[in-house]
Amino acid sequence: MPAISPNKPYRIARSRTGLGLFATRAIRKGTKIIRYFGPLLDSRKEKDDAIENKYLFELSNRWTIDGSVRENIARYINHGCKPNAESDVKPRKRKVFIRAIKNIEPGDEISYDYGTDYFKAYLKPIGCKCDACEKKRRKKRAEARAERLRLREKSERKARRLAEKLAKDHAKANVKLNGKSKRANGSHTNGSRANARHVNGKFSNGHDPAAV
Ligand SMILES: [Zn+2]
């Protein structure tokens, strides 16, 4: 890792996507943080035009900065969809500075928007992993979880209601059935009431088995 002078307000550290540049001190909105630099490539030169890497910073149709050099600490700054910095391009000077667009707290990762072309070419195919996109993804996942839970609870409620209804219907049917059978028994007992009386008579005669 390239050495960074201790009076700089940033350091290279591990981030979600590999390495990143992090504030070591508060950086006020509007402050130039670091220069993005490297050899200037001239698109009119075949040799320059053939160079291809992820750190090319196009200044104009003709000029591009090749930021892949080790000394270019700014190349550690990751892309952010809701960044706290921006690239401030000075085409005539052929210089680029990364500038804070928000107050940055110590420990915050510094990010700037790499632009649509880079996003389409490198980030969209693998899914952007910047804080904003991760947060969005987390929110979507939480919403999907909540929706699944809601649907499950709904189907459980439905199943419970159905079970309750079935139990009620069953109970009703039983009541009806019992009623019928009682009536049937009733008429039967009515028929054998004489027997019962007879039995009672027997019992009253002192042959009550319960009394024995
Ligand atoms: Zn993103």
Image (spheres, rainbow, N blue to C red):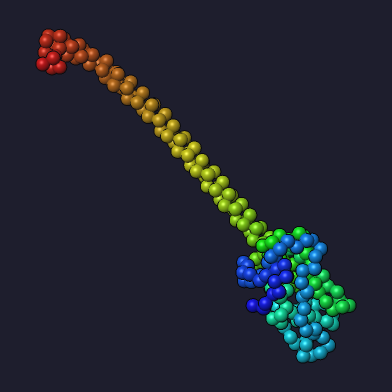
The location of residue 164, given as percent across then percent down, is: 46, 35
The location of residue 210, given as percent across then percent down, is: 15, 17
On screen, residue 171 above or below 91: above
At a point 15% along the width and 12% down the height, the residue shown is 203
Specify the quadrant that holds the N terminus: bottom right
Outermost residue, front side: 7
At a point 77% along the width and 75% down the height, the residue shown is 36
Q: Is residue 201 left or right of residue 83?
A: left
On screen, residue 20 above or below 196: below
At a point 72% along the width and 70% down the height, the residue shown is 7
Residue 6 found in image quarter: bottom right
At a point 26% along the width and 19% down the height, the residue shown is 188
Q: Is residue 31 left or right of residue 180?
A: right
The location of residue 37, given as percent across then percent down, is: 77, 78
Q: Is residue 110 left or right of residue 61?
A: left
- Report the front residue among 164 and 193: 164
Asked whether residue 171 appears in the rendered view, the answer is: yes
Asked whether residue 124 appears in the rendered view, the answer is: no
